[in-house]
């Protein structure tokens, strides 16, 4: 449905989008994820024809955005970060204007009514937009994007500034739109892409640093490697035992105490299930393991490590969908590598700060 | 383009600005007409139209100041620029909407001539004069109206362009008024200068000097072309402003 080939956008000498290539199929819900200034909005603006590209080719439903902008724009409904609402108009007037602006051919009343039903603004259609709450305004913006029933719908940070209930509603709405439309969603809220999207594309500094199915990313997250263990025993000895154990890459005593037990944060090497071994090792020494709690690896961790990783490398490895053999393991490896490096760094800091703990 | 034209036209009258403009224009027109003709016991409308032209320099910026500045401020231009409409269509829609409001108010202001004509008719009574004419000259009136419409169109194009450069409506209005004042001032300075070639150059570029033939009821094609090309240049420049922003 959407083809982006070697897209480059320079603002003067500043490179906002640096050679992005990707293709998005019909009916996919894709999340663009990235820190502020990563190039998400620029990519979307080029896709919608608002900006031009410096180099590269973008096509929507087979229509080149630069070559035939009018027809390409007809395929797209776009909700910018700040919904483009005319505050003096009523909701009906605004949607009628959108209808005319897009040269829509569908039956007018029925189509607008249908869109209002989908985004549930039927009860405010006669009200002036100025007097609506933020949540309703956002929905009117979405309704505007839906007018003309475009094949592709693009949302730029659609849930910013909404309350939790509204956020959930908008997310459900976007999910339901994915049934009939191709949806692109940009956000820097990680739970949002996880909740809504089938596929996640992480962009940093104008480049794609990861392009994964959400389930793969979820699998990486669920592959736990960090634990909080409550162990009764002399702290120094326990800690050095943990650190010496095979399969543990990092251990740290936390300040948390529970009776005579101390809590330790343990991180295992990738792909190693440390739990049984931990139990028996401690039992051998006569120390009781009274609690073991898995610490989930959050999407934040993945995100930060992937982004950091790409910033450290001079030539970041890019995983696009075409290199089908690698992605899953590649991302996992990348994340793992990043985490190990992080753990190493932490350990160094730790030993520098408290050398007596080591003995 | 038609959708934008309709929307602009409507938005003039759902905000106070349309009413403020029409009220001020019609009120001022009536007042000036009254002072320059009936109260000065004259059928000559030349000074009425001249003063109206200067008044337009302040009134037309009211119409044009919000055209693009407001869209930019509220970020609604993103809607227009990502819609299947060309930039030229968008600019023309807005230009024509402002021109329609101006043309409409100019048309309505023609009721000011009714008392002049009735007075003239009363003065003529049943007599017909062979060698002179009592009352306003209709050809001259029409020439003046056409001239005023053309000058108004040129001012609107200028204001549209300036509105596209800023997102502050007040700044747009003030700059437009200043530029129009400069353009009209050129015509006034012109009459004070004795050097022939400077006068020739000034009158060639001055908006005001082209108005002269219309005031005499002459249909001056060169002047029509002149005003039309001013409109074209500024509409074109406005389109370029938006094109440039896309390509930056």
Image: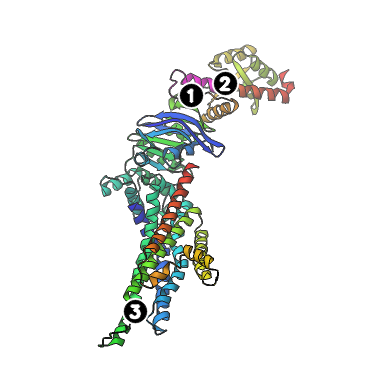
Helix, strand or loop at disc 2? helix
Q: CA distance from mark 2 to mark 3?
A: 92 Å
The residue sitting at 72% across, 24% down in the picture is: A352
Residue bearing mark 2: A337
Which chain hosts label 1?
Answer: A
Q: Nearer the viewer, mark 2 or mark 3?
A: 3
Q: Nearer the viewer, mark 2 or mark 1?
A: 1
Which residue in the rendered view is the most extreme toward the front? B196
**Mark 1, other Cα within 10 Å: few <14 / some 14–19 / many ≥20:** some
Q: Using the image, determine if residue B35 lies above or below residue B233.
A: below
Chain letter, disc 2 residue = A
* Most common secondary structure along the magenta stretch: helix
Q: Residue A162 or B183: which is nearer the viewer?
A: B183
Q: Secondary structure at mark 3?
A: loop
Are the residues under badges 2 and 1 in a single subunit?
yes
> Residue B177: horizontal and vertical position, in percent?
50, 64
Number of dots carrying numbers:
3
The magenta segment: A321-337
């Amino acid at each position: 449905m959407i083809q982006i080939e070697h897209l480059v956008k320079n603002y003067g000498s500043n490179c906002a989008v640096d050679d992005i290539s990707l293709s998005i199929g019909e009916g996919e819900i894709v999340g663009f994820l990235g820190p502020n200034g990563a190039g998400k909005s620029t990519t979307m603006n080029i896709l919608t024809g608002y900006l031009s590209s410096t180099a590269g080719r973008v096509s929507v439903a087979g229509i080149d955005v630069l070559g035939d902008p009018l027809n390409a724009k007809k395929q797209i409904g776009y909700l910018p970060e700040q919904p483009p609402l005319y505050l003096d108009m009523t909701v009906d007037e605004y949607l009628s204007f959108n209808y005319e602006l897009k040269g829509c051919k569908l039956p007018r009343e029925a189509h607008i009514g249908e869109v209002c039903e989908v985004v549930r603004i039927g009860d405010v259609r006669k009200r002036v937009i100025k007097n609506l709450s933020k949540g309703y305004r956002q929905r009117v913006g979405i309704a505007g994007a839906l007018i003309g029933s475009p094949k592709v719908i693009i949302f730029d940070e659609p849930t910013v500034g909404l309350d939790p209930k509204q956020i959930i509603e908008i997310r459900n709405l976007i999910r339901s739109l994915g049934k009939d439309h191709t949806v692109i969603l940009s956000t820097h809220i990680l739970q949002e892409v996880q909740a809504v999207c089938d596929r996640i594309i992480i962009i940093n500094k104008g480049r794609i640093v990861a392009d994964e199915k959400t389930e793969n990313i979820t699998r990486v997250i669920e592959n736990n490697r960090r634990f909080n263990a409550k162990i009764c025993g002399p702290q120094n000895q326990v800690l050095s035992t943990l650190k010496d154990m095979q399969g543990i890459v990092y251990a740290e005593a936390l300040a948390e105490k529970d009776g005579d037990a101390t809590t330790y944060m343990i991180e295992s090497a990738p792909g190693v299930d440390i739990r049984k071994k931990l139990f028996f090792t401690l039992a051998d020494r006569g120390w009781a393991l009274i609690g073991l709690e898995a610490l989930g690896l959050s999407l934040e961790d993945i995100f930060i490590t992937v982004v950091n990783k790409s910033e450290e490398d001079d030539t970041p490895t890019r995983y696009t969908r075409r290199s089908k053999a690698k992605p899953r393991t590649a991302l996992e490896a990348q994340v793992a590598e990043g985490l190990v490096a992080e753990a190493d760094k932490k350990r160094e800091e730790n030993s520098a700060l408290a050398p007596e703990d080591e003995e | 383009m038609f959708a934008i034209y309709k929307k602009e036209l409507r938005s003039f009258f759902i905000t106070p600005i349309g009413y403020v403009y029409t009220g001020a224009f019609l009120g001022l027109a009536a007042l000036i007409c009254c002072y320059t003709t009936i109260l000065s016991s004259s059928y000559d409308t030349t000074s009425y139209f001249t003063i109206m032209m200067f008044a337009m320099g302040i009134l037309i910026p009211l119409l044009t100041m919000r055209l693009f500045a407001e869209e930019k401020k509220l970020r609604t231009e993103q809607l227009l620029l990502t819609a299947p409409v060309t930039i030229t269509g968008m600019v023309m829609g807005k230009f024509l909407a402002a021109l329609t409001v101006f043309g409409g108010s100019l048309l309505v202001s023609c009721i000011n001539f009714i008392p002049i004509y009735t007075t003239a008719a009363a003065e003529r009574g049943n007599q017909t004069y062979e060698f002179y004419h009592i009352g306003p000259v209709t050809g001259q009136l029409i020439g003046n109206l056409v001239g005023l419409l053309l000058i108004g169109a040129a001012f609107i194009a200028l204001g549209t362009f300036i509105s596209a450069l800023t997102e502050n409506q007040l700044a747009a209005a003030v700059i437009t008024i200043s530029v129009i004042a400069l353009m009209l001032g050129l015509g006034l300075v012109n009459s004070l200068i004795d050097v022939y070639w400077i006068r020739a150059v000034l009158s060639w570029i001055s908006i005001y000097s082209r108005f002269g033939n219309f005031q005499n009821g002459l249909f001056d094609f060169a002047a029509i072309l002149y005003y039309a090309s001013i409109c074209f240049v500024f509409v074109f420049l406005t389109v370029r402003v938006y094109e440039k922003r896309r390509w930056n």
